[in-house]
Image (cartoon, rainbow, N blue to C red):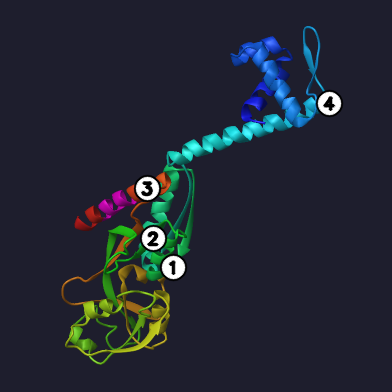
Amino acid sequence: MELRHLRYFIAVAGELHFARAAAKLNIAPPTLSAQIQQLETSLGARLFTRKTRSVALTHVGKRFLEEARAALKQVEHAELVGRRAAKGEMGSIAVGYILAAAHAGYVASSVLDFRDKHPDASVQLRRMSTIPQMAALIDGALDIGFTRVPDRFPAELTGFIIDRQPLCLVLPEGHRLATQKVIEPGALAGEPFVTTSLEMEMGYWSNVGALVPAHVSVQIVARVTDTSSVLFSVAAGIGLGVLPESMARMSVDGVVFRKVTGPTRTSDQVVVFRRNEGSPLVRAFIAMLRATARDLRRQAAE
């Protein structure tokens, strides 16, 4: 049984006349009659009782008509979905993000803008640190990642910078330096610092190194799993931290964010994706993110 058999059967059932149904289908009546006979043979049942001038549905034919219409409707829907998916109009995208990107605001705003233009697309957000995101992108568990900029992309991946966030010193509000709005790097000599685990966030030491000159000796007293844990550790008095400015929006009691004198140092955040991405929907999201990155750079320059 093929789809044409269903279409021919539905046409005859609608007209209850082979000649009229054949004209509607633009085929010869004998061809239509032969196709209906093939369908009946494959089902092992009569679908029509044939009379001299007309036909009538049998009990089996009436029941089969309901299913044939439902099946054809589902096939037509599948064809529509396939065409729209091929155009990048619908489907699903899995997006990973780090906390700093989420608090910067562009992750949520990008998803809102994309779904406004693609209302039939669904987006699943997953909070993941940088290295696990890279692995998930390669494995296909993620489609797009918002991560820290890596030293280099894995061979399967590529990306572009979407945001550069100033790095800030994070102190307990009772710390001796907390009363200062801007802090000299030399004042940090001997201070304890909390960072995320190097296995969880590649290159995190570069944050501390960006604010603290090499000749100023500091201590790494704890490595924690994520940036929110850095904030809570600072609030608990375990040590100081260095985080992107957007993390100040997390609003943890007992901590303050301060700038360090010297040129502005940034935590660069990137959009990461597969080099040979085949999904039109994912490619459309990437194109929109490129436009977002241009807008953010323009705003930063103003």
**Residue ID at (42%, 80%):** 232
Q: Amino acid at mark 4?
A: His
Callout 2 crowding tier (Cα within 10 Å): few <14, some 14–19, many ≥20:
many
Check the image and name the residue furthest to the bottom: 190
Q: Quadrant of residue 17?
A: top right
Check the image and name the residue furthest to the top: 53
Quick one: label 4 or label 1, which is nearer the N terminus? Answer: 4
**Residue ID at (41%, 72%):** 251
Quick one: label 4 or label 3, which is nearer the N terminus? Answer: 4
Residue tagged by mark 1? 128
Along the line of sight, which residue is nearer the eye, 26 or 245? Answer: 26
Quick one: label 2 or label 4, which is nearer the N terminus? Answer: 4
Residue extent of the magenta highlight: 288-296
Disc 3/disc 2 C-alpha distance (Å): 13 Å
Per the image, label 2 sits on a secondary structure element best described as strand
Disc 4/disc 3 C-alpha distance (Å): 51 Å
Q: Is residue 41 left or right of residue 78?
A: right
- Looking at the rendered image, the disc whose residue lies closer to the viewer, 4 or 3, is 4
Location of the N terminus (image quadrant)? top right
Residue tagged by mark 4? 59
Mark 2 and mark 1 in contact (Cβ < 8 Å)?
yes
Disc 4/disc 1 C-alpha distance (Å): 59 Å
Q: Which mark is residue 273?
A: none
Quick one: label 3 or label 1, which is nearer the N terminus? Answer: 1
Q: Which mark is residue 283?
A: 3
Callout 1 crowding tier (Cα within 10 Å): few <14, some 14–19, many ≥20:
many
Is residue 35 visible in the rendered image? The answer is yes
Disc 1/disc 2 C-alpha distance (Å): 9 Å
The answer to whether residue 76 is above or below residue 242 is above
Disc 3/disc 1 C-alpha distance (Å): 21 Å
Residue tagged by mark 2? 145
